[in-house]
């Protein structure tokens, strides 16, 4: 390995890849959180028919590999002429949007389950207290249950972010140049697979450790540890 | 309550069984299996195609027993060097970059690089008119490399794990054109999926020599292969295989 | 058997391969997990350091990369190792490399589950064992492990479901499991959506089977224990 070429030519490309990886993961976990809120609330409902509505969705996305979901969206949907003629094709023809869509749909299913768990572990006495004070169902959900659930669910959510970061390594298979894509493309020219895999591994590791630190800091600020017991 | 014992036993068995060595007495042919008509996997799971028939003919000439192993394309050279197999017969172009990693036999056929695009599009291979187009190629091929070396600032290059996936994206309209090996493109244009597409312009790169790769320094195997290539060309075996796939000679 | 344009049997064979791969990985992974947990709960600082680094590093790098590295980057080491046993060609085939990589990841996550379970076993049990004259090893084998097993089972079941989906990544090193079988069928038929959907249904069926099996095992392991104790 020539270190000068590495620092001048290849490392900047790897860092570009890290930028794309971070961008995809950040957007996916934020969009996923927003989509997951109604789903999580429905899943925690006391009425069985409400609970069952998001179940099929969650079961599908948690029960199949992300790689397969990505291929279904990217290569699969283009099998249909109707999809290719529709407005959606403007976005679906772009691997970036396909990856983002798949990652968001995937993580939404996991976050919804995290939210369900968190909502269910909010002590029922608190909800009853809110209702006794004259809050409506919606109010007690918004002001009492969700803020409490957010703190209870934060450690699990931060875990999910890390899992998504690692899962995102499959997007290179649809031509995106994320960390993995750059490592593959560079080693296709240099035949230094072992070396560039290790560079990629170190980049992922650095991002994971960085993200973990950030989440620990937030958890500490929010005193999440005080709330973990029931 | 004895599950864990069974599991530990199973784990030990896996360790012992999993690291089983690859026996070294047979010659292993490495190929990709997603590059019709040269190498592809049929419904029964068998690897077939021009490369395979040539490989088998060479093995027969050398009097060796051969076994076929598949590998993803961009890992195929590392896999050869990792001794996952002993030679690559997968329509691999002989390039200087690759020669730093592996040794090549004499060429067993000659290819060209040529663009394909929809019949309906006025796709011109002049650099000026290519501007802004999205062009696909397979990763770690000379087509991909040619695009990066010659058109990196002109077109958007999309690199695929397999040639098949590049074609899928050409038919779905994600790509404006594909640069690839002429004969592989020729085969695809003949197929149902390729009927609305055609060659555009002249080949951009001629005299692309295709060879069999072996690990560096394995001159014994390389010399035997060179001799066998000469022999199958001389005795007509090569022509027979050629004619099965192409109505013209590709040697 | 449904023919599926001739690709039915190969998909079935792929399914069997996925099952074998996941079982082999979980067997080896449990061993890694127990070792990791033993390290982390050890009184020896160095063992704790080893256990901790193992989890941090393995969990910080994508499974995709572990699979690729297990296949391509173990060669030098194994050839060296093999030369001691008179077989310098020793190398991992895709199955073994996939097993190793998935087991490594399963081990890192399960060591956390085991650690939690180990810590939840009352000290008195160990002391009782010592009092009746059992050796440390026997206490671990006869008293600690059976209880750990019961407590850890639900967590391990979830990890197994994750592992089952991660087996799809081994398709990237050319092991013909479900994902690659679908990929081959897609190349042959040019019907991507159809075959990815079939693959998805196979994964979902396997998930259901595992969930049923988990329920059975958990019930058996919990024999003699009341529910609220866990």
Image (spheres, coloured by chain):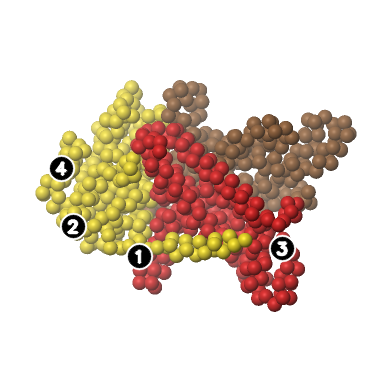
Chain colours: A brown, B yellow, C red
Front disc: 3 or 1: 3
Q: Residue at x 70, y 40 (%)?
A: A116
Q: Secondary structure at mark 2?
A: helix
- Label 2 – label 4 distance at C-alpha: 19 Å
Q: Are marks 2 and 3 in contact (CB under 8 Å)?
A: no
Of callouts 2 and 4, the N-terminal one: 2
Residue B111 drawn at (x, y percent): 23, 41
Residue receiving disc 2? B62
Chain of the residue displaying label 3: C
**x and y, in percent, of residue C87 in the image:** 35, 69
> Mark 4 sits on what residue?
B240
Q: Residue at x 66, y 61 (%)?
A: C148
Query: Against C75, is C173 above or below?
Result: above
Q: Residues within 10 Å of mark 4 (few under 14, many from 20)?
A: few
Q: Residue furthest left?
A: B235
The answer to whether residue B194 is visible is yes
Q: Residue at x 49, y 34 (%)?
A: A73
Q: CA distance from mark 3 to mark 4?
A: 74 Å
Judged from the image, the secondary structure of the residue bearing numbered disc 3 is loop
Tell me the subunit letter for badge 1: C
Q: Mark 4: which secondary structure?
A: helix
Residue named by callout 3 = C121
* Circles 3, 1 touching at the beta carbon (< 8 Å): no
Q: Which residue is mark 1?
A: C89
Quadrant of the snapshot with the N terminus of chain B: bottom right
Whether callout 4 and callout 1 share a subunit is answered no
How crowded pointer 3 is (Cα within 10 Å; few <14, some 14-19, many 20+) is rated as some
Q: CA distance from mark 4 to mark 1?
A: 36 Å
Give SS at disc 1.
loop
In which quadrant of the rendered image does the C terminus of chain B lie?
top left
């Amino acid at each position: 390995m020539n270190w000068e070429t590495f620092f001048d030519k290849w490392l900047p490309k790897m860092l570009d890849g890290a930028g794309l990886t971070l961008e995809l993961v950040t957007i996916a976990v934020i969009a996923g959180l927003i989509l997951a809120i109604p789903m999580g609330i429905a899943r925690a409902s006391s009425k069985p028919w409400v609970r069952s509505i998001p179940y099929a969705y969650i079961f599908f996305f948690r029960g199949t590999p992300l790689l397969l979901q990505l291929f279904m969206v990217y290569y699969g949907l283009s099998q249909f002429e109707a999809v290719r003629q529709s407005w959606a094709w403007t976005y679906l023809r772009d691997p970036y949007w396909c990856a983002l869509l798949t990652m968001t749909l995937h993580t939404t299913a996991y976050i919804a389950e995290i939210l369900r768990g968190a909502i269910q572990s909010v002590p029922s006495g608190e909800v009853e207290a809110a209702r006794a004070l004259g809050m409506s169902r919606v109010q007690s959900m918004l002001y009492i249950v969700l803020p409490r659930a957010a703190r209870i669910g934060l450690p699990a959510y931060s875990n999910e972010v890390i899992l998504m970061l690692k899962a995102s390594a499959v997007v290179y298979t649809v031509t995106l140049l994320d960390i993995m894509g750059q490592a593959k493309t560079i080693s296709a020219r240099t035949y230094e697979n072992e070396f560039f895999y290790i560079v990629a591994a170190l980049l992922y590791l650095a991002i994971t450790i960085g993200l973990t630190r950030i989440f620990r800091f937030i958890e500490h600020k929010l005193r999440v540890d005080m709330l973990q017991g029931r | 309550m004895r599950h864990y014992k069974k599991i530990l036993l199973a784990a030990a068995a896996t360790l012992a069984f999993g690291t089983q060595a690859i026996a070294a007495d047979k010659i292993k042919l490495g190929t990709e299996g997603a590059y019709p008509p040269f190498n592809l996997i049929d419904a029964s799971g068998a690897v077939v195609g021009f490369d395979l028939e040539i490989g088998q003919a060479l093995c027969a000439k050398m009097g060796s027993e051969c076994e076929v192993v598949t590998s993803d394309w961009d890992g195929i050279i590392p896999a050869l060097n990792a001794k996952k197999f002993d030679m690559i017969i997968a329509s691999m172009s002989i390039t200087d970059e690759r020669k730093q990693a592996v040794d090549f036999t004499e060429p067993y056929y000659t290819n060209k690089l040529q663009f394909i695009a929809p019949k309906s599009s006025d796709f011109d291979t002049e650099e000026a008119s290519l501007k802004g187009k999205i062009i696909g190629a397979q990763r770690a091929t000379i087509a991909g490399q040619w695009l990066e070396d010659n058109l990196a600032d002109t077109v958007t290059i999309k690199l695929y794990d397999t040639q098949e996936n590049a074609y899928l994206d050409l038919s779905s309209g994600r790509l404006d054109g594909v640069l690839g090996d002429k004969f592989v493109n020729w085969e695809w244009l003949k197929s149902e999926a390729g009927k609305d597409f055609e060659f555009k312009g002249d080949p951009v790169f001629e005299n692309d020599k295709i060879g069999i790769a072996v690990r560096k320094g394995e001159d014994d195997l390389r010399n035997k292969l060179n001799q066998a290539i000469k022999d199958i060309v001389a005795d007509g075996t090569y022509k027979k295989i050629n004619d099965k796939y192409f109505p013209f000679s590709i040697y | 058997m449904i023919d599926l344009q001739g690709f039915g049997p190969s998909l079935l064979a792929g399914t069997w391969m996925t099952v074998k791969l996941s079982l082999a990985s979980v067997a080896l992974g449990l061993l890694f997990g127990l070792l990791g947990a033993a390290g982390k709960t050890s009184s020896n600082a160095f063992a704790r350091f080893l256990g901790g680094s193992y989890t941090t590093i393995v969990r910080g790098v994508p499974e995709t990369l572990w699979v690729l590295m297990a296949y391509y980057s173990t060669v030098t080491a194994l050839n060296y190792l093999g030369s001691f046993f008179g077989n310098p060609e020793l190398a991992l085939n895709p199955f073994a490399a996939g097993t190793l990589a998935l087991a490594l990841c399963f081990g890192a996550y399960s060591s956390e589950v085991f650690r939690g379970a180990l810590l939840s076993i009352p000290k008195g049990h160990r002391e009782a064992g010592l009092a009746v004259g059992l050796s440390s090893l026997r206490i671990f084998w006869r008293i600690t492990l059976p209880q750990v097993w019961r407590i850890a089972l639900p967590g391990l079941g979830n990890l197994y479901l994750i592992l089952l989906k991660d087996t799809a990544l081994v398709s990237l090193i050319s092991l013909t499991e479900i994902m690659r079988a679908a990929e081959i069928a897609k190349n042959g038929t040019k019907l991507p959506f159809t075959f990815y959907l079939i693959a998805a249904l196979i994964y979902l069926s396997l998930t259901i089977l595992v969930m049923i099996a988990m329920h059975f095992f958990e019930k058996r392991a919990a024999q003699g224990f009341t529910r609220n104790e866990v």
